[in-house]
Image (tube, grey):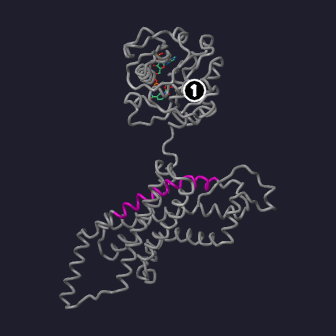
Amino acid sequence: MGTKVMIPLCSDFTDKRDTICIFGTGDFGRSLGSKLLQSGYSVIYGSRNPGDSSLLPRAAEVLSHAEAAEKCSVIIVAVQREHYGFLRELEDVLQGKILVDVSNNLKINQYPDSNAEYLAQIVPTATVVKAFNTVSVWALQSGSLDASQQVFVCSDDNKAKQQIMDIVRAVGLTPLDKGSLVAAKDIEDYPLQLFPMWRLPIYTCAGLTVAVFLYCVISDIIYNAEKKNDVSHHLMITIPNRIFPVVSLMLLGLCYLPGVFAAIIQLYRGTKYSRFPNWLDRWMLCRKQLGLVALSYAFLHAIYTLVIPIRYSVRYRSDMGIINLIKLNKTRILEKPLLWRSDTYLALGILGFFFYIVLGITSLPSVSNSVNWREFRFVQSKLGYLTLVLCTGHAMVFGWNRFLFLERYRWYMPPVYMISLVIPCIVLILKLILIIPCIDNKITKIRQGWERPSRGKSETKSKTYSVAL
Ligand code: NAP
């Protein structure tokens, strides 16, 4: 069949494209049919009720399945997998035709095989191509302007696949070659996934947020209530402004901790050719999302901090402080160490936040696609550690010598800023050890493929992991 590879610039075509058959006059079949007609194709529907065509585009013809299939070489099967049975009877007429499977399932792993492979099994005389399942009816009807335009295409027959990719292009969508029909299972799972890489970071963040919230409520509101001092208004700004920086710093530490663990494991095993534990694999894969969640909390901390001067309680305390000084006829002297401390703390916070944002921006696909691997590693690793150092310094200077005063340990609970320092300090100490030249050289050698002789032979070279520290 001689399909012309042409992207339509307007609906006025001088040369007509091929005729495409669509089995099924449901929502998807109707929407895709309209799109094909707009792109210059002729459309013939194959339906169980050819007489009922009131909802279909007027330019389309509606016939029985067998009659429609006879007139076209490409047949789009816009029918649910559960109803594929009727295709068995059409095996003869479908011989040598291209069947496009557009189906999705209701849940991941609903069937042992993919719908496309199932279709190929039902009609072995036809060539099956998986396509269009990632496009919704809404996207087709709204002109795909504000929806994903990617259409994953796979088939065991390259020629048929190219033909369908041309049709995808012609209707204004972007085909992505996913290889052979084996890939259909992944393609069918794709529209069913709900933020797979975000789940772990969001659960971790939610868990830490609840834990730090409870810790602050006990050590602040309940502790003060016990002393007949009602500070329940802290729930609005004071406590959130403790939770956000504390959780943000913990999450930033958690972004860099798996890289350090991976290096230690490789050093211990003396090879990079062995699998990391599953939990570490999963953790490493979601570091970008962990970092972005941490950035969002840092952002909230910055906004909450900006409103401190306009808070009524802060203004009241400041006014009362001045009035008391006047009443007692006292002057408050400018304490130089305090001056340095507060400026250093703020400067570290501002710089840390700035590099946090740089990290966030470079993780955007449009930016990360425009830098090379070395540049990306430089930003995510070197600048990432710099951000961790600055933010850890920010929390340390904020706490200063408070950890020395027993009255700060309410009910023996350390101030919450101290808890936020645990993970980043572990990461930074381990990293400092790992960059000692003799250890660093060993890790570099292992990452270049060197294996410790005694272990090298027995290890299975199952998988190579490149770790971005
Ligand atoms: P639908 O509205 O339920 O339409 C399916 C069509 O299949 C019916 O209109 C009917 O057409 C035909 N049909 C129903 N039972 C049949 C049977 N026993 N034997 C033969 N044909 C039968 O479904 P849809 O939303 O259009 O979806 C069609 C396919 O596209 C599905 O596989 C779905 O997973 C896939 N898909 C849908 C979307 C979406 O947004 N809806 C997105 C991507 C992929 P006739 O009455 O004309 O025979």
* Residue 194 sits inside the magenta stretch: no
x then y, percent, for residue 169: 48, 28
* Residue 322, picture quadrant: bottom left
The answer to whether 437 appears left or right of 304 in the picture is: right
x then y, percent, for residue 465: 66, 53
x then y, percent, for residue 304: 33, 64
Callout 1: SS: helix
**Of 100 and 218, the residue lying toward us:** 100
x then y, percent, for residue 133: 51, 30
Residue located beneath label 1 in the image: 162
Q: Which residues are magenta?
A: 278-302
Image quadrant in which the N terminus is located: top right
> In this picture, is 461 found above or below 247?
above
* Residue 318, picture quadrant: bottom left
Give the residue at x 37% y 16%: 55
* Residue 391, picture quadrant: bottom left
Decide whether the magenta segment is chiefly helix, strand or loop: helix
Q: Residues within 10 Å of mark 1 (few under 14, many from 20)?
A: some
> In this picture, is 126 found above or below 226?
above
Image quadrant in which the C terminus is located: bottom right
